[in-house]
Amino acid sequence: MKDGIANNSTASISQARKAVEQLKMEACMDRIKVSKAAADLMAYCDAHIREDPLIMPVPASENPFREKKFFCTIL
Amino acid sequence: MRSPLIPEMATQEVQLNETLAHLKTESETLKSKLEEERAKLHDVELHQVAEKVEGLGQFVMKTRRTLKGHGNKVLCMDWCKDKRRIVSSSQDGKVIVWDAFTTNKEHAVTMPCTWVMACAYAPSGCAVACGGLDNKCSVYPLSLDKNENLAAKKKSVAMHTNYLSACSFTNSDMQILTSSGDGTCALWDVESGQLLQSFHGHAADVLCLDLAPSETGNTFVSGGCDKKANVWDMRSGQCIQSFETHESDINSVRYYPSGDAFASGSDDATCRLYDLRADREVAIYSKESIIFGVSSVDFSLSGRLLFGGYNDYTINVWDVLKGTRVSILFGHENRVSTLRVSPDGTAFCTGSWDHTLRIWA
C-alpha cells in the first residue's frame, strides 16, 4: 500500500512537472499584434477572393455542380 | 487516501503533496503570465479592422446533388483530389466511394464494426482509410475492377486503445495521422503499420485533427473533449501551442488556407478563429439564436467564408473577417455531422444523420 500511495503521487507530480515545462516552453513564443495578424488574414482573403468559386461564381457551364446537364452512365 | 500506517510514510506523503501543490501553483502562475503576454498584443478586434472591407453580396447556394445509399447516419466524408470523388462512412459500417458529379457509387466496403467515424481519401486517389469503434485505422486500396472484393486487400495501419475519431493522410499515401478517444494522436507508416510519432497532451478524447497546408510546414491541429485545441510539431511530437477558450467539446478544427490561423467548431454552439502568430482567439462566430453544437467546419477557397454544420440540421455560413452570418442553409433532416469544401472550392459536401450526403454550390 505504501508503494500505491507513492506511485499515485509520483504520477501526479510527473504530470504536473510536464505541464509546467509545457507552459514554460509556450511562454517563450514570439507573438505578433492582433492588428498585424488581422491585416494579414484580410490580405490573404483579398488576394484570393476573385478565384473563390463560392463567392465569385464562375459561369454555370464551368462549375460541374451548377450545370443543368444530367449525366447518364451506360450500364 | 487511507491514513498511513508508518510515520516515515506520513512524512513521505506530506512531502509529495507539498511538491505537487508547489508545481500546481507554478502552473497557475505561468498560465496567468501567458494570458498577460497574449493580452498585451490584443490591440484591436479582427471585425473592427475588417470594417473597411467590402461586404459580401447575396448568396445563392443550394443542394445540387443528394447522395443516397447509406443505411444509417453518415459520420464522415472526404474529397478526392480529383474534385469529383468522395468517400463517406456511416454508423451502418459501410464505407462508400461516390462520383459526386453523377451520384453513382463506385465502391463499397463493409467494415467489421459499426460507427465508422473517420474516413479519408489518399492523395493519389488510389486508396481510402477508415476506422471507428474497432479502434483501428485501415487502408483499402481502390481497385479499378468493380468486382474485386476490396475487403480482401485491407491493411490495418493504426491501433489505438479507444475509438478512432479522425484520420488523414499526410502529403503522400505513405503516412497517416490519427486521433482517438484514447486521448492521443499518432502518425503511422502505412506500409509497415509502424508508429512513427505519438502526440500526448490532451486530457480527454481527441475528436478531430487537421494538417497544416503543405507550404506552412510540418504541423497539425487537434481538438478534444478537454475543450482544448492543440498545435503539434509532427517531427518532435511536441505540443507547440494550446488554446482553451471553448466552453465544451471541440468537434472540428480546420486550418485557414494561408496556414496562419485555424477555425474550430464546438458543442458550445460557437465557431472560433485562432491566429497562430498572435497566439490567441481572434473571432467568435455565434448568435443567441444558435444553441445547438457545431459538428464540422471548413473554409471556402479564399478563407473569407466559414461553413459550419450544426446539430440543428442547418449549415450556417459566416463572413470570417466581419464575424457576421451571411447565410443559413436548410435541407438535411437530421444533424449535419461532417462538412468539407471541395479541393477546388467549387462546392462543399455535407453528411448527415439523415443517411444522406448533399453537395452544395
Image (cartoon, coloured by chain):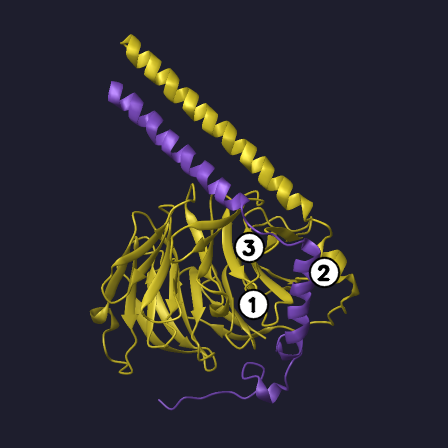
Image coordinates of residue B257 in percent, x first then y, are 56, 67
Q: Nearer the viewer, residue B347 or B102?
A: B347
Assign a secondary structure to mark 3: strand
Assign a secondary structure to mark 2: loop
Please give the chain letter of the residue carrying mark 1: B
Tell which tag, 1 or 3, sits nearer the viewer: 1
Which residue does the numbered mark 1 point to in the structure image?
B257
Q: CA distance from mark 3 to mark 2?
A: 17 Å
The quarter of the image holding the C terminus of chain B is: bottom right
Q: CA distance from mark 1 to mark 2?
A: 17 Å
Disc 2 residue crowd, few under 14, some 14–19, many 20+, Cα 10 Å: many
What residue type is disc 2 on? Lys
Which of the chains is yellow?
B
Viewed as shown, does residue B181 lie left or right of A36? left
Q: Is residue B327 visible?
A: no
Residue in the picture at 59% in, 89% down: A61
Residue in the picture at 60% in, 52% down: A31
User: Between disc 3 and disc 2, whose residue precedes?
Assistant: 3
Instruction: Identify the disc placed on residue B264.
Output: 3
Which residue does the numbered mark 2 point to in the structure image?
B322
What residue type is disc 1 on? Pro
Q: Choose top left, top right, bottom left or bottom right for residue A42.
A: bottom right
Q: Is residue A65 above or below residue B89?
A: below
